[in-house]
Amino acid sequence: MKKHLEYNDNKSHKFWKIEVFDNTFTVTYGKIGTDGQSKTKEFETDEKVAAEAEKLVKQKLKKGYVEIAAPDKTSNTPKEIDYYQELIKFDKEYGSETYSDTFCIADNEDDFFKYWLSDCSEEQLKEHEQNLQIFAMADGSGGRYAFWFTDENKDPNKSPIIYYGSEGEIHLIASDIKDLIQILSFGVEISEDYFYRSCDEEDHEDEEDCFSEYLEYHPNFLTFRKWMQEKLNIEPVKDWKIEGQNTEVEKLTKKASEKHKENFDKWQHQIYPNPND
């Protein structure tokens, strides 16, 4: 939730705005034309912060403030976001594995498929290297994420993402890098073909505290969730504090499989008849 209000009369020209993120909101106010000053307040639940935010907005409207609508962008072609490059920038600025468990941007590894597909011919190996680009570490045991390119598409932002596991698993994980970023907002590493948040009962009193220790080891997790929402306009997944699988993440991986698995299987079976998938 974001609201921008302004008040204008013969004496005053001021603004007031509020931004809600998870269980906190930030209020910024001051004279129009200045940065103003900000205050952030945290609440026990998302529901409580939403109710208080609505209450404050109504109070301002009663005092004569007017909500300023977002600018109309329909007449302009919006600039396309390069999600892949933005993720690289974030990783470099905040540090690998500090925002999502074991995730790390990595340079394309020319020898990865040479060892991973040791029984392939040189021709089959070349086909893999031409159509797959390793771009990130996926887990703590040698798994990798790769873009799958086709003859028609070589754009990382529009390519499905494949998980190559350390035990020979091959799984379609996301339809594109945008969906992967949303999956990363769950914060846990992949295990085979699913993402699962597990908790040690001794470390927390209830499910809502499941993430508390996680934040100690991944201090930029909340920063990442806020960044993707504000910078990339991608909504982080909800229920990220609770143990188990996340329904939004499950939908994203299922969407990728339904959309691309048949074509990907046909492609890899042509050059590698018995892949472990």
Image (spheres, rainbow, N blue to C red):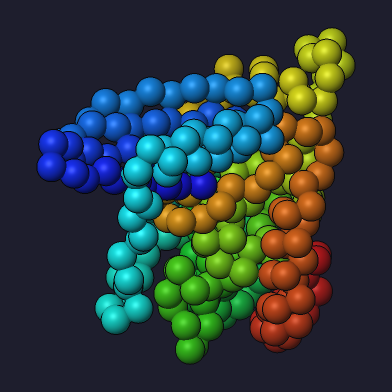
Q: Relative to residue 206, is residue 94 drawn left or right?
A: left
Depth check: 76 or 276 in front? Answer: 76
User: 79 left or right of 124?
Assistant: left
Vertical side of 219 occupied by 228: above or below: below
Q: Which residue is painted at 78% across and 33% down in the image?
A: 242
User: Residue reaching furthest top?
Assistant: 202
Q: Quadrant of residue 92?
A: top left
Q: Say which residue appears at 59% left-offset and 48% top-offset.
A: 236
Residue 142 figure quarter:
top right
Does 130 sit left or right of 71 as displayed?
right
On the image, the x and y values in percent for residue 258 come to 76, 76
- When the figure is inspected, residue 112 is found, relative to residue 24, above or below; the finding is below
Q: Nearer the viewer, residue 135 or 211?
A: 211
Relative height, residue 214 to residue 253 (above, below):
above
Nearer to me, 200 or 266: 200
In the image, farthest residue toward the bottom: 152
Is residue 244 visible in the rendered image? The answer is: yes
- Confirm whether residue 33 shows in the render: no
Residue 187 location (% of width, % of height):
63, 38
Residue 89 in picture, x, y percent from top left = 34, 46
Query: Is 217 left, or right, of 257 in this rendering?
Result: left
Q: Position of residue 241 (x, y in %)?
A: 72, 32
Query: Who is closer to the viewer here, 251 or 123?
Result: 251
Residue located at (55% from left, 22% from top): 42
Q: Quadrant of the C terminus?
A: bottom right
* Number of numbered tags placed on the structure image: 0
